[in-house]
Amino acid sequence: MIAFICLLRGADPQLPRDVAAQAQPGDQVILVDDSGAPDALTRLRQLRWPAGVSVTPIVTGTAAPGDGGIATNLALDVVTTSHVLVLEGRTRLTGPLPRTLDQSLFCGPDSILAQTIFPATPLRRAEGTARSDIAFLWALRQTHSAFEHPDRWATTPPRPGPALIGAVTALLDADPTASDWLQRSLPHWLTDPAPGARRIIGSQPIPFGRRLPPPAPPRINTAPLRIALRGPHARRTPLAYPHLAPLWADHLTLVDADVDLTVYGHPHDIIADHPKTVLLSEEPLWDSLYSPAPVDDVIALPMGRVHQLNHHTSAIFAYGRIPYFVLTDPRYISAYQRLFTRNAAWSLADWQAQFAARQVDAFFMAEYRMTGVYDFAQHEGDIIGLCSWRTRLALATPGRVRQQGAGWPGSGTRFDLTDWHGDKLRQLDNHTRILSAVENTHQPAYLSEKFFDAFAVGARPLYYASPAHSVHTLGLPQGSWVNLHGLTSDQAAEALPTSEDADFCAAYAAAQTMLRDLFTEDTIAAERARLGRAVIADLQRLAESGPI
């Protein structure tokens, strides 16, 4: 017997009818509606099903974040049959359904889960994009022979981002027997990678073309890795944030002498050739302006060659759900939890009234930068300098516009404030219709606090993101924010919305609910753990590597 799991958010309207036509007595139909539609349960109860078919409706009452992992797991929890078929996206069931359950069922070009009948084993699906389902796919591979052949999984293979290496590493840590399968699968996953994914895979000890070695045994009862932080920008590295230190306290220790690695935060800080020197940079702007090759894992500086860990070359910054910088200070998280909880309680009508009462049309809070050095672009890595572009946009935007930040008339620098981020949120809360969240640098794996700040203060975010940018993995409704990618600053100024209609307010209200549900303690803990593992793994790997 088969359990048909139908994920109804974004599904073809005919999907329930397709399933009803194919279901047989003893089958189970599980209908999951996580769209947040108020009439979802009423609509599901009006459907008619064949006698002997068990139907279980699941309605979450709110739009779930991500791509369907949560919805799938809700359904898997109530499966009682021997086999499962997950139907998601625009998948349709056409033609007779094969009842030979040890054979694959291919229904269309959607997600791999919507193409195979698999045994109902105790599986859990990770939330996120296709790269997050690696452990799930491995579990299926162990129970179903169809997953032996990656080219049969999907008509269109996933387009992974840099976080792929984190998922691969986590699976190898959990189950070393997956190494051969991963070796065969990785080329398939990388047929059309997002910028940075292939380079990160190539920089890690996961070789292609030969048998993978078994994972190294864990380092037990060994002395922690000794790290020296050097240079004026050392405070802007993951190792310098007190809130993150417990994540690697048992593995890394900061010392001044007799070190295993010397870590810098900025290329200009490296003034001497120390053994085992690492540039650990959290700021893509510095990498773009001052690193000779921002997408390379080893760079040549005047004092010698050094390892480079940044948003292109390290899984440290390849976040799953919550980006790296938001984790560096607990005040970010606490502010977002408070504000998104408040915002999610407001209705569409509340938001319409809120925006109608705003005193400012658009607010740009960023440093004034018009020097040509900030106008740069690099095709490899999808790197674009946005500082000057953002300044020109602020000058070209019509209406009631405010600019604030170092270099603007009457503005100081944020570093003069004890809590610059809290001051920003207090100043802008319910104050402006539109808030620029444009980064200093466009880089696909880089997402700072700016994007979340705009939603938190109840403003429509302006952002600049290519299709490969990780901001899209948040799954927020596209209508809730403005993407200015590919536009000149003048074109962007003309494209800014002049009012907020009901469709926007509905999308915006849904986004607030999704952001409230994003910043849960479980998600935060999981993202912190991922970050800790990545820092330890990268620094241990470099400490144990040979000369460069």
Image (cartoon, rainbow, N blue to C red):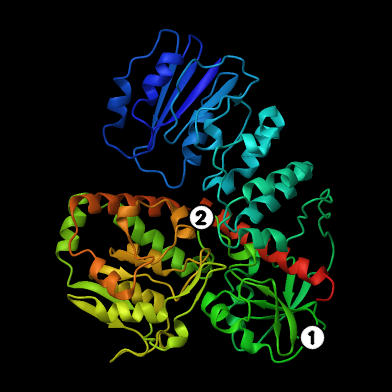
Q: Is residue 455 left or right of residue 223?
A: left
Q: Residue at x 74, y 65 (%)?
A: 250
Position in image of residue 98 (x %, y %): 56, 16
Quadrant of the image containing the N terminus: top right
What residue does disc 2 label?
Answer: 321
* Disc 1 and disc 2 in contact, CB within 8 angstroms: no
Quadrant of the image containing the C terminus: bottom right
Q: Is residue 473 above or below residue 452?
A: above
Q: Residue at x 67, y 74 (%)?
A: 308
Q: Amino acid at mark 2?
A: Arg
> For the residue labelled by badge 1, is the local secondary structure a helix, a strand or a loop?
loop
Q: Is residue 394 left or right of residue 225?
A: left
What residue does disc 1 label?
Answer: 257
Position in image of residue 442 (x %, y %): 47, 70
Is 458 or 10 nearer to us in this picture?
10
Q: Is residue 278 left or right of residue 409?
A: right
Q: Quadrant of residue 47?
A: top left
**Is residue 144 at all visible to an observer of this figure?**
no
Q: Amino acid at mark 1?
A: Ala
Q: Is residue 325 above or below residue 173?
A: below
Q: Residue at x 51, y 64 (%)?
A: 444
Is 11 or 327 nearer to us in this picture?
11
